Amino acid sequence: MRKMDCNEDKNEKHKVLWRIMDIAQIIVLSLIIAIVVVVNIDYTKTSDDYKYFYRKTDSEVQKMLERKDSFFLYIGRDSCAYCNALTTALCKGNTNVDIVYLDTQEYKDMIDDPDSMVAEEGQLIYDLFKEKYGYQYVPYLCYVKNGEIIDAYQIDYPENFEKSSNFSKNIFLNKNEKLLTNWISTHSLVKKTGTCSATAACE
């Protein structure tokens, strides 16, 4: 009789332990799902400085163009000092518009790959990408109206700027900041809302 009691007692303890382990697994799994969701939500926008910039892929931007959406398109990459200067100017200038951001970092990484075949393929893909959007250098900021690029902000690069180490990272600030703000204000677009002006693209 006592042996049965001991066995039953052990079985009960095992059942309790299994229940605790099941609950722990559910909690861990829930935490992992929550982290993945938060990371994905954070990725739709860049850092706080990019509060009103909406990261989109090339295919997402193409869908916006096909739908004949109107929006400001900013093509650049986080590792580009001039792109960061433009970002600062856009934020500092309080341009009051939502901007779709297309990151070219993956193309840059392919071009910089030590494998020459990958680098060549990357350069070809990137050249086609630049041709599609009609630009030569990043940062590139343009206004899209009804799915057509109708105007691009002209960045006043000095001659041979790529070789110039003293080319100011503040190119968009001061005098040029006002030019940038004026250029943006010439295009009528929904004001800053905290949600993308092309709402269907930002769901």
Image (cartoon, rainbow, N blue to C red):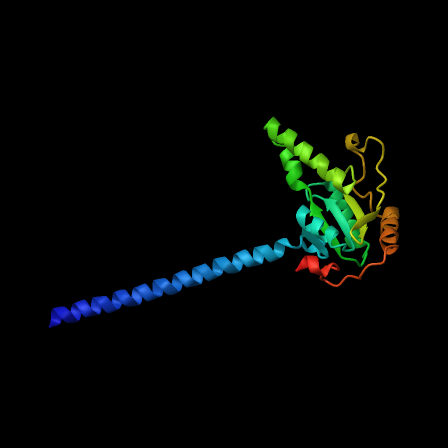
Give the farthest residue toward the front. Answer: 66
Q: Residue at x 79, y 47 (%)?
A: 141
Give the quadrant of the C terminus: bottom right
Of residues 177 and 156, the one drawn nearer to the viewer in this rendering:
156
Q: Is residue 5 above or below residue 159?
A: below
Give the image location of residue 193, x and y in percent: 75, 63
- In the visual, does 114 lie left or right of 183? left
Percent from the top left, x then y, of residue 107? 66, 38
Q: Give the vertical position of 125 relative to 72 (above or below).
A: above
Query: Is residue 53 visible in this depiction of the protein?
Result: yes
Classify residue 77 by image quadrant: top right
Circle count? 0
Q: Residue at x 85, y 58 (%)?
A: 188
Q: Is residue 119 or residue 158 the one in the foreground?
A: 119
Q: Position of residue 29 (x, y in %)?
A: 45, 59
Q: Quadrant of the N terminus?
A: bottom left
Q: Residue at x 64, y 40 (%)?
A: 106
- Position of residue 36 relative to residue 75, above or below, is below
Residue 35 drawn at (x, y percent): 53, 57
Q: Is residue 138 visible?
A: no
Residue placed furthest toward the left = 1
On the image, which quarter does residue 187 sit in? bottom right
Of residues 178 and 77, the one drawn nearer to the viewer in this rendering: 77
Q: Based on the displayed image, in which of its 4 quarters is residue 164 positioned?
A: top right
What residue do we see at 78% from left, 30% from top?
Answer: 163
Q: In screen coordinates, is 56 left or right of 40? A: right
